[in-house]
Image (cartoon, rainbow, N blue to C red):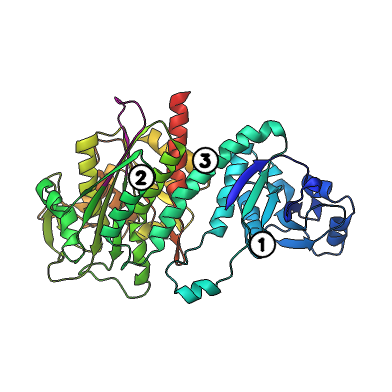
Amino acid sequence: MEYSVKSGSPEKQRAACVVVGIFERRKPSAAAAALDASGTVASIMRRGDMDGKLGTTLLLHKPAGVLCDRVLLVGLGRERDFDEAAYRKAHAAAAKALRATGAVDAVSYLSHQPVKGRDWRWNVQQAVLSFEDAFYRLDALRGEQARKELPQPKLARVAIDVPRRSDLPEGERGLSEALAIVEGVNLAKTLGNLPGNVCTPTYLAEQAQALARRHKTIAVKVLEQADMEKLGMGALLSVARGSRQPPKLILLEYLAGAKEEKPIALVGKGLTFDAGGISLKPADKMDEMKFDMCGGAAVLGAFAAAAALKLPLNLVGAIPASENLPDGQANKPGDIVKSMAGITIEVLNTDAEGRLILCDALTYVEKNYQPTVCIDMATLTGACVVALGSHASGLFTNTPALGRALLAAGEQIGDRAWELPLWPEYEPQIKSEFADIANIATVGGREAGAIIGATFLHKFTKKMKWAHLDIAGTAWHGKKATGRPVPLLVQYLLNHAAKRES
């Protein structure tokens, strides 16, 4: 899709479709009123065909008094309740309706609606993100004939209008940010949606290398099993023993900041399929365990966006990639493994494997990069889904300022997180009778499962300013990857870069 930002009167647009909003109780937005010199829209509303309910749409063909071929009316809900969520929902509804038309181009005036506390840069950015989320599809895995028979939307160009020409610079900035975020989100979505027989650890490493070829500012190195054995990554390697797929530790560098500046580190769980190992998962919904690598996909997405934006900062990434399958060599409940940090771990449940591959990656990052902050993201615990559902990622941190910055970025971009405690009182719950720690709670049963997972990771991150995002509820919805938390990460990086410049 081709996007642009413009400023012009709706009644003068010669586009295939002009998109305007209607508030509840049949109140036209300013753009809709300007478009309705002939009274066609008012007549439609009087007849009750459009009452302005949020997310409803009505397509008008060749209305009198305008130059465009179509007018799409979009319900904005009650004017006094129009907020960020309503703004996104209206744009998503518009995108869905436009896909079903024969229009090849459209101009949207929904972006004229002010949102409290937000500027035109935000309006344009969110409009494009909402449109792209609605337009995303993955059809590459369908057969050739099936792909030919799929309906192909004709829409190729969308212009986002801003009220005044003086607003164009802000709008253009919002557009450039949105397009970079879209590149990262769509990469993360596609990797997440691929099945486990396609997206293996090797494939994930190849996609990182392909990303580096597209963006010359990104460098990639892949550690193989022998490299990890030399480094003493016993925790990560213990998970990989049950799989025929060789494990990979994918390392990325984007160094566009000052040479002396310590990097920001992003670490993402890259478990390309998780059957639970010997502690086998139930068959129901096991197919969704292809999404267990969405943390790693988010690291790749964030790097893609940072490079596209040419952010002036140093960024390093680590993706421990493996499968977790049952096999004669797989981890057994009760096994004890030794991590790269020298901490021994009693594996009481082989399905708590994400923390095992992450802990060695976190140790590697701390020893080799000494990052200014480290953020990891992982589909770590079902308990986080129980706690927060699919609306917010769980956030844990040992650095309050980092936590506040991530929460603020999530609110700003619409990819929210919610902080949960990381108190020392939880640490005795992972005490082991025979090793330094256990990989699940030995006291308290299943309570506070998300916190226990974060507490385990904190054992390996106490020397760093660190945050953990549990994305088990947000990385996918239904049977489709969401691309989260790429928007949150990129907004955090944008804010960090802006803060340093100011």
Q: Earlier in the sequence, mark 1 or mark 3?
A: 1
Distance from label 1 to label 3 (Cα)?
25 Å
Distance from label 1 to label 2 (Cα)?
39 Å
| Image quarter of residue 370 | top left
The mark found on residue 177 in the picture is 3
Q: Earlier in the sequence, mark 3 or mark 2?
A: 3
Quick one: SS at disc 3? helix
**Residue 24 shown left or right of residue 220 in the figure:** right
Residue 433 in the image: state x and y as whole percent: 11, 55
Residue 435 visible here: yes
Residue 406 in the image: state x and y as whole percent: 43, 40
Quick one: SS at disc 1? helix
**Amino acid type, residue under disc 1 in the picture:** Ala
Residue that carries the numbered disc 1 in the rendered image: 97
**Amino acid type, residue under disc 3 in the picture:** Glu
| Residue drawn 31% across the image and 27% down it | 261
Classify 10 Å Cα crowding around label 2: few (below 14), some (14-19), many (20 and above). many
The magenta segment: 251-266
**Residue 348 vertical placement versus 317 (above, below):** below
- Return the residue nearer the eye: 211 or 335: 211
| Residue drawn 46% across the image and 54% down it | 186
| Residue drawn 54% across the image and 40% down it | 176
Residue 307 in the image: state x and y as whole percent: 41, 40
**Residue 372 vertical placement versus 107 (above, below):** above
Quick one: SS at disc 2? strand
**Residue 113 shown left or right of residue 199 in the figure:** right
The mark found on residue 396 in the picture is 2
Residue 311 in the image: state x and y as whole percent: 43, 34
Residue 474 visible here: no
